[in-house]
Image: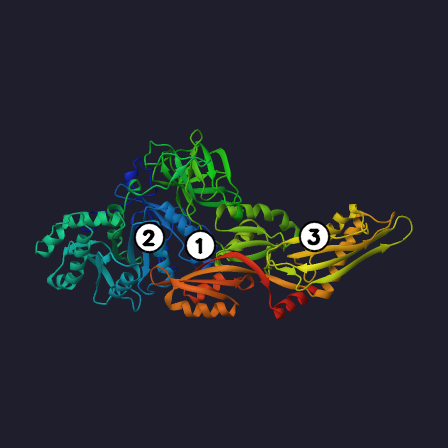
Amino acid sequence: MGEKGGGHGGQAGAGVGAPTRSAAIRNVVLVGHTGAGKTTLVETLLAATGAISRAGRVEDGGTVCDFEEIEHRLGRSVSLAAAPIEVDGFKVNLLDAPGYADFAGDLRAGLRAADAALFVVSAADGVDGSTQLLWDECAAVGLPRAVVVTKLDAARADFDDITLICQRVFGDGVLPLYLPLLDDDEQVAGVIGLLSQQIYDYSDGQRTAVAADPEHLELIEPARNALIEGIIAESEDETLMDRYLGGEDIDVKVLIDDLETAVARGHFYPVLPVSALTGVGTRELLELITQGFPAPGEHLIPAVTAPDGSPKAPLACDPEGPLVAEVVKTTSDPYVGRISLVRVFSGTLRPDQPVHVSGHGMAERGHPDHDVDEKVGALSSPLGKTQRPVEFAVAGDLVAVAKLAHAETGDTLSAKDDPALMEPWVMPDPLLPVAVTAHAKSDEDKLSQALARLVAEDPTLRLEINPETHQLVLWCLGEAHRDVLLDRLSTRYGVAVETVPHRVSLRETFGAAAKGRGRHVKQSGGHGQYAICEIEVEPLPNGSGFEFVDKVVGGAVPRQFIPSVEKGVRAQMERGLLAGYPVVDLRVTLVDGKAHSVDSSDMAFQTAGALALKDAAAQAKPALLEPVDAVEIVLSDEFVGAVLGDLSSRRGRVLGTEPATNGRTLVRAEVPATGLARYPVELRSLSHGTGQFTRAYLKHEPMPASLASKIIAAEAS
């Protein structure tokens, strides 16, 4: 890992071939907060290995990680981007994951596809709460990690300070492997290897290695001792610590071997200074990736079952094994069609190969279950918009697959005669509702097809056609996610939509008992209409539903028309009495009525039943009920007070708080849904990016009269 004095960082040329051995592959995802410099670092590594001719440009055109022009307009990455490089016989698949919380789905896809993570931290910006959440995301799936410190040439940047911050935020095992070497102008000119005690100087544009002089040896001694002790603490050789404390000079090769083992197992997290602008530290970083990060065969493969849920034998990362691969990213173009980024976990994938496509589906998000057979198209090695054909992809590799018409993000590809289904990764729950309508009739015709394509690409999007408000709602992860979806509808699919206020599903009910009379009598020549009914209405406890009771005596309402009265009452309950919302929790008793031997009919008594309910409502003054959600919030302790005050302003009831992990607090509350419309955005601001929450419908309860009157007045106008 640079401490061996090896020559890693060789040229890859114009393309990266398909490796035949899984052991020669490294899959690495770059994670970190927005603005840390992940994409610039990817471009620097591409340039350093010859994959691109100059920083930021692919040799035959197109930016490296540019899937969409919207990324430039927003100033941040919005999609998972893949870029392969070749480093001394290793194929390294670099995955640039968005750092913004709105695109956590792509981040988790990157974690699924990778076997290790490079955590990119800006020395100029420090570590914020969202950065810690990203670290925890990696820790949750047991991903080996290293920390890359960028922007060391920025004003106020200090490598020692940022390392201490990382140690405090990320925990044990975070120690520098190199220190930055500053020139006379206090600019980073190279790095100092703590184990090898070598200086790697980049000042003349080339990397040269020289032994550290006494001045530098004295400078690095404290950090070197801490690194050695940290490595020995993770060593499987239990005698090593005693030997070291006894004064023995431990061989550097032994330390490097133990370091590589600890990094690969996710027990140790080296810190490296890297300048994406000058290339300082890139060779050392490439050596860490190839020598310290695990091969795909060392990473646990997710559980696999048959599509019907029956168990299957655990998989091994074997090119000769049964084919099992997973779609980790889907992109589509109106002209090119659908392109799927696929991670092969077992077997070997080839062009034009028949496969079985199976998916768990998420019906609640508009993603149906499916099990279909189809044939894969061409395979290619992705580099931004550039696709270079490859002949095959072995277990452990990443490849772009064309013409998978039915496969969606998260689906499993397997052999037709041996179908399989991989355990799904956890997707974040979209909690920001955005109601949309088609701009014109021509847009209505294209909207459903465009939305189906968006759903196939983005499993974090949830589509809802609310049966009560009749609104088409896109449930998103945040405002940036919303903006990207709307932009894709417009620019990619040519569909114009307008956003409208999101309506919460309210209810209406009676606040007191009442009586009502419905009279529907019309004589206009010929066959008339005649129906009279009298009812009594009683409110029932919350959640009781509707009861209809028949207490008619003496045949005042003929038997055959009693169901008609009930049908009319139910229809009026669906239409609402105050503001057009459904009426709930009532007992309606039919007590009397009148009929005509000729003019009474089913429709006449339906109308009379509806009129009777409206008459009773005029006396009882029904109330509006609003949905209340059970909310759980996890956030850093320092922001609990601000969040509790904010919940109170939303008419929320805090049920309690309790300690969570890593200096966080869990807050439980009941909050009216009307107060949660923009809560994903506002919680992020209140908690400085540390807050996450879930919501689940709990009940409907009476809305304050002042708010209800505003809604009723708005509906009346």
The image's mark for residue 139 is 2
Do the residues bearing badges 1 and 3 touch, measured as CB atoms within 8 Å?
A: no
The amino acid on which the numbered mark 3 sits, given as a three-letter code, is Phe
Can you say whether 617 is above or below 473 in the image?
below
- Work out whether mark 1 precedes mark 3 in sequence or the reverse, and give the earlier one: 1
Helix, strand or loop for disc 3: strand
Helix, strand or loop for disc 1: helix
Q: Residue pushed farthest left?
A: 247
Residue 502, x across and y down, in percent: 59, 59
Spatial CA distance of label 1 from label 3 is 50 Å
Q: Is the residue marked by circle 2 packed among few (<14), some (14-19), or many (20+) residues within 10 Å?
A: some
Helix, strand or loop for disc 2: helix
Q: Which residue is mark 1?
A: 103
Q: Is residue 678 visible to the viewer in this orientation of the structure?
A: no
Q: Residue pushed farthest top?
A: 417
Residue 9, x across and y down, in percent: 26, 48
- Work out whether mark 2 precedes mark 1 in sequence or the reverse, and give the earlier one: 1
Query: Which residue is located at x 53 percent, y 56 percent?
Result: 697
